[in-house]
Structure formats: C-alpha cells, structure tokens
Amino acid sequence: MDNWFDNETLANEWYDDMVRRISWKAFEDQESWIHMLGELGEGRNPKVKDNFLEKFSEYFDAEISWLKWDMIYNMLADYYNSDIDVPQWLADEYNDYFGLKEDNRGYMEGTDD
C-alpha cells in the first residue's frame, strides 16, 4: 500500500484541505445550489436551494472517491497476494486503475472459469 500522508501531516490539516477543495468546487458550481443575489426578488439575499445536501454530497463523493477506490483495490491486492483468485474482469479493472502492464510489479493476473 502507498503512504498517502507523511509523518508531519495532521488529520486536521488533511480535513481542512478537503474542505477547501470541496468549497472551491462548490464556488465554481454555485449557481446550481444557490439562488444568486436578487434572483428571488429585488433586495433579497442569496439563498441556498433545496438541493444543497445533494450537491455537496456529490462534491464530497467526487473529492474522496480516489481514497475509497484506492482502499478497495489495495484490499483486493491483499487477497490476491494471499493466494485468492480474482476474476479476469476484476484483475483488468485493478490493472487499469493503477496503470499496470504485464511486466510491471504488482500486475494482477485474473482467472477465467
């Protein structure tokens, strides 16, 4: 498995960085989740739309999905390295995810049966 954090990175720093990245994505896409200034009438403040939770959940999922898939594929590699066979289609997915070719270290060979 890869080390995603050095020994100097604190959990709070990682958390804050995630919030910053999600906030930036939300800013870029703000018209999809917020009524803009004056949109609801003259003198009205901006207002969060009813889809706020759905949109921010999408932003979060997009930001964190790399971690989820990295964990899942590394767990698959652990099973594979423990002499558990993997279907060919799943081995192909794994190899594609990590950009592995047959001559690369860590390449996974699947079985068809």
Image (spheres, grey):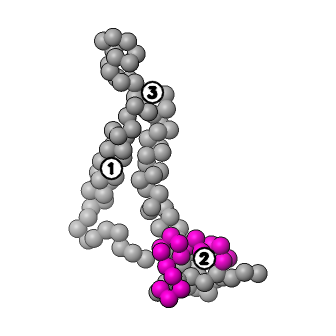
Q: How crowded is mark 1: few (under 14 residues within 10 Å), some or many (20 or more)?
A: some
Q: What element carries label 2?
A: helix
> Mark 1 or mark 2, which is nearer the start of the sequence?
1
The front one of 18 and 9 is: 18
Q: How far apart are marks 1 and 3 (CA)?
A: 21 Å
Name the residue rendered at 34%, 17% in the picture.
Answer: 38
| Amino acid type, residue under disc 3 in the picture | Lys
Of mark 2 and mark 3, the one earlier in the sequence is: 3
Residue, disc 1? 21
Q: Judging from the image, what secondary structure is the residue with disc 3 in?
A: loop
Q: In which quarter of the image is the N terminus?
A: bottom left
- Considering only vertical position in the picture, is 101 above or below 75? below
**Magenta region: which residues?**
86-104
Query: Which residue lies at the image location 49% right of the left edge and 79% below the top edge?
Result: 100
Q: Does the magenta stretch include residue 4?
A: no
The kind of residue tagged 1 is Arg
Of helix, strand and loop, which one carries label 1? helix
Residue labelled with disc 3: 49
Query: Dot 3, crowdedness within 10 Å: few (<14), some or many (≥20)?
Result: some
CA distance separating discs 2 and 1: 32 Å
- Horizontal side, residue 107 vs residue 9: left or right: right
Looking at the rendered structure, the kind of residue marked 2 is Ala
Q: Which residue is situated farthest in the left direction here?
A: 8
For the point 35% across and 73% down, the residue is: 3
Q: Where is mark 2, residue-wise?
A: 91
- Asked whether residue 108 appears in the rendered view, the answer is yes
Residue ID at (48%, 61%) = 68
